[in-house]
Image (cartoon, rainbow, N blue to C red):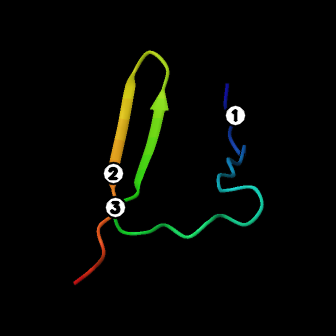
Amino acid sequence: TLEPGDMIYTGTPGTPGEMKDGDVCEIEIEGIGVLRNPVKLES
């Protein structure tokens, strides 16, 4: 349970790798679903 004044920190531990064209960023929440975002090089 969050209380007034609670803070949520998110991020990547350590040094994240660089994403490349064709990579897929995938996030899953159990019982809810999967979100997949393909990485496309900006042209």
Q: Residue at x 70, y 34 (%)?
A: 3
Label 2 is placed on what type of residue?
Asn
Q: Earlier in the sequence, mark 3 or mark 1?
A: 1
Label 3 is placed on what type of residue?
Gly
Label 3 to label 2, Cα distance in Å? 10 Å
Q: Vertical placement of 30 versus 2: above or below?
A: above
Task: For the C terminus, give its image quadrant.
Answer: bottom left
Label 3 to label 1, Cα distance in Å? 40 Å
For disc 3, the neighbor class at 10 Å (few under 14, some 14 to 19, many from 20) is: few
The residue that label 2 is drawn on is: 37
Tag of residue 22:
3
For disc 2, the neighbor class at 10 Å (few under 14, some 14 to 19, many from 20) is: few
Q: Nearer the viewer, mark 3 or mark 2?
A: 3
The residue that label 1 is drawn on is: 3
**In front of the other: 38 or 35:** 38
Q: Position of residue 29 (x, y in %)?
A: 48, 27
Label tally: 3
Tag of residue 19:
none
Q: Residue at x 35, y 43 (%)?
A: 36
Task: For the N terminus, give its image quadrant.
Answer: top right
